[in-house]
Image: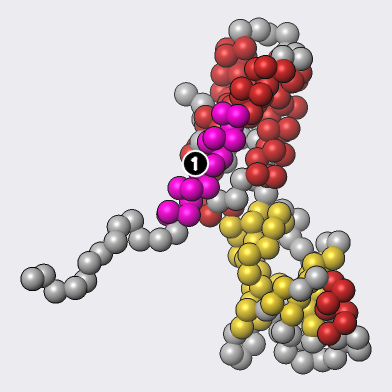
């Protein structure tokens, strides 16, 4: 069974039927995780934090990938509208104070306008916790060991310069990612449609 980094490495070596790549397996897992972070967007990656603005800016979380919602926690609460940086500057050239209406993201900061010190709730997609130690595991390895194996084997085959096998395993990984994202969307709604109309 694939339950942690050590067993994932062992499975990859077994599927490749070679041991000369052992020193590079950790790097291949790291590359697979980077690929997952670029492609995968599922509810298990969603995180919600409360951040206090400083001079109209919030620092992005270290594990930030993509934003989903920014809510100003004043009275009443309201979701802020995202605009590109040039639009925010054009709308608020003098950095006025007041309850914010819009935000943008530049570098490692979320900039709000108007400027306010009230806390904001930030819903975002976070990076997958990497497998570092031999006994490391995470939610993705527990839910989709096949994805981790496919991704690792894709980069292992890049290492040994087997382009055909690389494409095969990368395609397998992409198929699992697509199914995982579809399942995630289905999991956000009711499992079945309930008919509440009177029975004839």
Q: From what the image shows, is residue 166 above or below residue 99?
A: above
Q: Which of the 4 quarters of the picture holds residue 20?
A: top right
Where does the C terminus fall, quadrant-wise? Answer: bottom left
Query: What kind of colouring is applied to the model shown?
Result: secondary structure
Examine the rendering and report whether any part of residue 158 can be seen.
Answer: yes
Q: Please tell me in which quadrant of the rendered image residue 155 appears.
A: top right
- Residue 177 painted magenta: yes
Q: Verify whether residue 154 appears in magenta.
A: no
- Residue found at the very far left of the displayed protein: 200
Q: Position of residue 66 (x, y in %)?
A: 69, 58
* Residue 178 image offset from top left, x and y in percent: 54, 42
Q: Is residue 51 left or right of residue 183?
A: right
Taking the spot 74% from the left edge, 20% from the top edge, the residue there is 158
Secondary structure found at label 1: helix
Crowdedness near tag 1: few (<14), some (14–19) or many (≥20) residues, C-alpha within 10 Å:
few
Residue named by callout 1: 179
The answer to which of 59 and 90 lies nearer the viewer is 90
The image position of residue 58, as x and y in percent, is: 78, 71
Judged from this view, the residue extending furthest toward the front is 200
Numbered range of the magenta stretch: 171-187
Count of marks placed on residues: 1
In the rendered image, residue 26, in percent from the top left (x then y), is placed at: 71, 26
Foreground of the two, 180 or 141 = 180
The main secondary structure of the magenta stretch is helix
Q: Residue at x 76, y 63 (%)?
A: 60
Q: Is residue 110 above or below residue 142?
A: below
Q: Is residue 9 among what the camera can see?
A: no
- Which quarter of the figure has residue 186? bottom left
**On screen, 134 above or below 85?**
above
Residue at far right of view: 94
Name the residue: 51% across, 26% down: 2
């Amino acid at each position: 069974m694939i339950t942690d980094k050590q067993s994932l490495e062992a499975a990859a070596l077994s599927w490749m039927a070679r041991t000369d790549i052992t020193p590079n397996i950790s790097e291949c897992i790291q590359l697979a995780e980077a690929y997952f972070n670029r492609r995968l967007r599922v509810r298990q990656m969603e995180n919600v934090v409360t951040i206090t603005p400083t001079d109209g800016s919030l620092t992005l979380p270290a594990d930030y990938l993509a934003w989903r919602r920014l809510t100003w926690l004043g009275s009443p609460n309201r979701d802020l509208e995202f605009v590109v940086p040039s639009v925010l500057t054009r709308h608020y050239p003098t950095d006025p104070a007041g309850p914010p209406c819009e935000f943008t993201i530049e570098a490692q900061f979320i900039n709000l306008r108007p400027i306010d010190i009230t806390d904001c709730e930030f819903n975002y997609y976070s990076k997958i916790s990497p497998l570092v130690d031999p006994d490391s595991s995470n939610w993705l390895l527990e839910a989709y060991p096949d994805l981790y194996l496919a991704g690792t084997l894709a980069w292992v085959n890049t290492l040994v310069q087997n382009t055909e096998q690389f494409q095969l395993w990368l395609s397998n990984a992409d198929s699992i990612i697509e199914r995982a994202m579809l399942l995630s969307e289905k999991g956000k709604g009711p499992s079945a449609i309930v008919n509440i109309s009177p029975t004839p």
